[in-house]
Image (tube, rainbow, N blue to C red):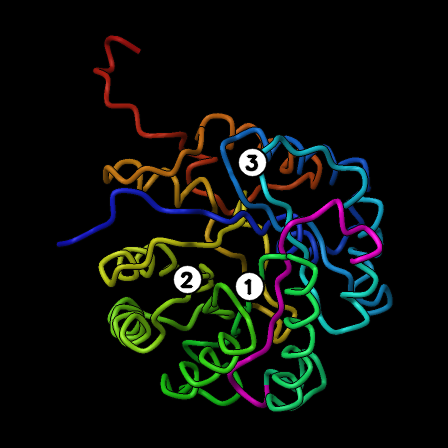
Amino acid sequence: MSIPAEIRVREVGPRDGFQNEPETIATADKISLINALGRTGLKRIEVTSFVRADVIPQLSDAAEVLTGINLPDGVSASVLIPNRKGLENALAHRSNFDEVNVFLSASETHNKRNVNRTVAESVAGLTEVLGVAGGEGLRREAVISTSFGCPFEGKVDPARVIGLAADLAEAGADEIGFGDTTGMANPVQVREFFELAERELGGVELTAHFHNTRGQGLANVLAALEAGVTSFESSFGELGGCPVPAGATGNIATEDLVSMVEEMGIGTGIDLEALLGVSRQVRDVLGRPLGSHTLVAGPVDWSPASER
């Protein structure tokens, strides 16, 4: 088995995770948690999104969060951008972030229910956003949701996903993320998909984004590693999910990802104990148990029991 020596991890919990929480999280708590994440060794953090407050009230404080955080040098803040208006709102605070992320779904039904646009309309709108963001010197990632399956349409043709990725790369995306938005992927499918993507999408960074809805998230990480993927997105505490449809539970936990790959000899540059400390903080803020396995069991301890 061929696996990489190291991987890159982008933390998406402060946006992808928080937006699915039913109770409002205080802005001060968000800022504190993001600042703490920035001191764990993580180099990229998705901090918020400039979306309509009536659609996602949890992120209505995007400007306050973005201007309130204080990340160390070398840690990039990214913002999820839904459309041109969202980009314009974000650019009012241009000095506070380094990357933008845009998104669409591979399936027509999911895209329509999620953003009320056809896929073609989304591609056209995001092409404009990517162009403007590039002119501002921002790093650009495009995320394709339902890349491995749609809860409404079932199987999604990999060729369709690769075609959308090629369009977005041509529009200026430096990185393409492929999302298993509702946890439908399996390891064989994942490995075959990324082997195809590696062949067809040269010159653009490929990122895997798995959800643990059916407990296969880390198995899918292993399959992606075997296919040559070295970039992953995850969420501390296993926060997150997808609002369309209900029941699509959280992303893989960042601490579970880090624990597994570090035990495999793959470097991340992330301090697992520090990361677990931040997950304990968000658990206390939310006041409920979280899905992260490493948060419950702790890191693997190879020392004899008599020496602990």
Q: Residues within 10 Å of mark 3 (few under 14, many from 20)?
A: few
**Badge 1 amino acid:** Glu
In magenta stretch: residue 107: yes
Q: Give the residue at the far left of this rendering.
A: 1
- The residue identified by callout 3 is 74
Where is residue 299 drawn, in percent x and y?
37, 30
- The residue identified by callout 2 is 205
Quarter containing the N terminus:
bottom left
Q: Residue at 37% x, 71% y: name it.
A: 185
In terms of image quadrants, where is residue 189? bottom left
- The residue identified by callout 1 is 141
Side (left or right) of 163 relative to 77? left
**Badge 2 amino acid:** Glu
Query: Of 256 and 296, which appears nearest the observer?
Result: 256
Label 1 vs 2, first from the N-terminus: 1
Tell me where the magenta segment starts and ends, as one range. Answer: 91-109
Q: Secondary structure at mark 2?
A: strand
Where is residue 216 drawn, in percent x and y?
36, 61
Q: Residue at 71% x, 70% y: name it.
A: 82
Query: Of 298 and 122, which appears nearest the observer?
Result: 122
Label 3 vs 1, first from the N-terminus: 3
Picture layout, residue 41 above or below residue 137: above
Q: CA distance from mark 3 to mark 1?
A: 18 Å
Q: Residue at 61% x, 75% y: name it.
A: 245
Tell me if label 2 and label 3 are in contact, CB under 8 Å: no
Where is residue 163 drawn, in percent x and y?
43, 85
Q: Secondary structure at mark 3?
A: loop
Q: Residues within 10 Å of mark 1 (few under 14, many from 20)?
A: many
Quarter containing the C terminus:
top left
Picture layout, residue 201 above or below residue 95: below
